Amino acid sequence: MDAVIRGDYGANEISALARSALQFAATATATRSAYAGPTESSFTWQDLRQQSSHLLDSMPLEADEKLEMIATIALFEQICTVANLLALDPNQP
């Protein structure tokens, strides 16, 4: 799990598709964060959006599978947002 958090998707022997999905999710999340509140990052949300679009297009998935992946990522982000707003402690059951 630490490798995924660091963005080292090749450290564990996962499929190329899973690695691409993780990279897309990380870039899509960074794009949304950059759009919501620009930081001093070297990437603008427009750059990140272009990267996430390229990653999505390069995946060997059907259009409905890509849509399902995007919806899953969006659902996860929304759940995390609600948990943060409620100040839920992730260490508590």
Image (cartoon, rainbow, N blue to C red):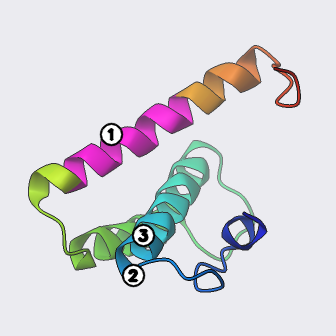
Compare marks 1 and 2 and give the one earlier in the sequence: 2
Chief SS of the magenta region? helix
Residue appearing at x 82%, y 30% in the figure: 90
Q: Which residue is mark 1?
A: 71
> Which amino acid type is marked by label 2?
Ala
Looking at the image, is mark 1 or mark 2 nearer the viewer? 2
Query: Quarter of the image holding residue 26?
Result: bottom right
- Packing grade of label 2 (10 A; few <14, some 14-19, many >=20) is few
User: Quadrant location of the N terminus?
Assistant: bottom right
Residue appearing at x 53%, y 29% in the figure: 78
Q: Position of residue 91 (x, y in %)?
A: 88, 30
Q: In the rendering, which numbered label is found on residue 18?
A: 3
Q: Is residue 24 left or right of residue 63?
A: right
In the image, residue 14 above or below residue 73: below
Q: Which residue is mark 2?
A: 16
> Which amino acid type is marked by label 3?
Ala
Which one is nearer the viewer's eye here, 92 or 67? 92
